Image (tube, rainbow, N blue to C red):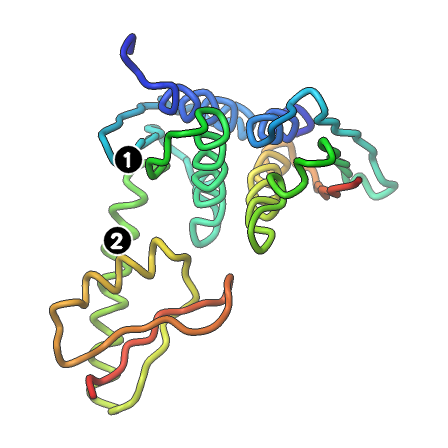
């Protein structure tokens, strides 16, 4: 999931090297992925009306279903 | 595939990563023309890729489109992602919904809103009903709940 989110985010931004995904696991087993991108790239991973962020969540969630996990994606700055 | 465009290559790579991350066994086919790059996944059990109401496959399609734009900077072609005939089945389902809405609008004499759908699907219904002069179609509401309305022609 982490690798997938990183790959997808890198394909959307001007500065792929600035993409960072930190992974935590909460007590209930939920995986939290914190996505950070270059200062000027937040618009690219969020998109108009948040559409791109929503799409990222939908695809990574499908990967989580395959791994039988729950996942939350936080876009952090 | 030696003459595949950069955009087609981006779609193929992205689709391969997604199919792999979802643990699916699927063969990926990329085709392209002047207007559209189409990535199709062939295989069984592609329900996880499609998702409820096509949410997941539409998300993959959106991301692939953005990635092509970002990766090539000038390739503005439409990107379509399909799986196991999903898009064709969806068009048929939308046309049935549209036919039902026309009947309801004419019988009831009032506008009939369809379920919320994305811009691409609203366009399919709108174009399907274009020649039906007894009704008119328009969209109302805000994304993501924007829906197409079928109303008796005024």
Q: Which residue is mark 2?
A: B91
Against B119, is A67 above or below?
A: above
Query: Going by the image, does B43 lie left or right of B99?
Result: right
**Local crowd size for mark 2, using a 10 Å CA cut-off: few (<14), some (14–19), many (≥20):** some
Q: Position of residue B63 (x, y in %)?
A: 50, 37
Q: Nearer the viewer, mark 2 or mark 1?
A: 1
Element type where label 2 sits in the image? helix
Against B29, is A39 above or below?
A: below
Q: Residue at x 51, y 61 (%)?
A: B144
Seen as rendered, the residue at the extreme top is: B2
Quarter-of-image position of residue B76: top left
Which disc number belongs to residue B36?
A: 1
Write down the chain letter for disc 1: B
Task: Say how many tags the image has.
Answer: 2
Which disc number belongs to residue B88?
A: none
Against B121, is B43 above or below?
A: above
Q: Position of residue A75 (x, y in %)?
A: 73, 42
Residue A62 or residue A15, whichever sits in front: A15
Write down the chain letter for disc 2: B
Q: Residue at x 25, y 46 (%)?
A: B88
Q: Residue at x 66, y 36 (%)?
A: A41
Against A76, is B13 above or below?
A: above
Q: Position of residue B18 (x, y in %)?
A: 51, 28
Residue A6 or residue B101, whichever sits in front: A6
Residue B102 or residue B66, whichever sits in front: B66
């Amino acid at each position: 999931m982490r690798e997938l989110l990183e790959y997808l985010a890198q394909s959307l931004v001007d500065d792929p090297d600035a993409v960072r995904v930190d992974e935590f696991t909460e007590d209930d087993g939920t995986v939290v992925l914190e996505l950070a991108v270059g200062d000027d790239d937040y618009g690219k991973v969020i998109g108009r009306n948040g559409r791109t962020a929503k799409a990222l969540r939908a695809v990574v969630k499908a990967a989580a279903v395959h791994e039988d996990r729950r996942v939350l994606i936080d876009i952090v700055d | 595939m030696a003459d595949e465009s950069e955009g087609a290559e981006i779609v193929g790579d992205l689709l391969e990563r997604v199919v792999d991350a979802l643990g699916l066994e699927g063969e990926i086919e990329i085709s392209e023309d002047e207007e559209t790059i189409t990535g199709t996944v062939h295989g069984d059990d592609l329900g996880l890729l499609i998702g409820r109401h096509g949410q997941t496959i539409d998300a993959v399609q959106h991301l692939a489109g953005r990635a092509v734009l970002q990766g090539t900077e000038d390739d503005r072609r439409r990107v379509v992602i399909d799986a196991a005939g999903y898009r064709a089945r969806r068009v048929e389902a939308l046309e049935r919904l549209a036919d039902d809405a026309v009947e309801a609008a004419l019988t009831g004499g009032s506008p009939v809103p369809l379920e919320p759908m994305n811009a691409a699907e609203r366009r399919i219904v709108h174009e399907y009903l274009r020649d039906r002069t007894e009704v008119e179609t328009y969209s109302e509401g805000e994304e993501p709940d924007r829906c197409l309305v079928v109303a008796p022609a005024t």
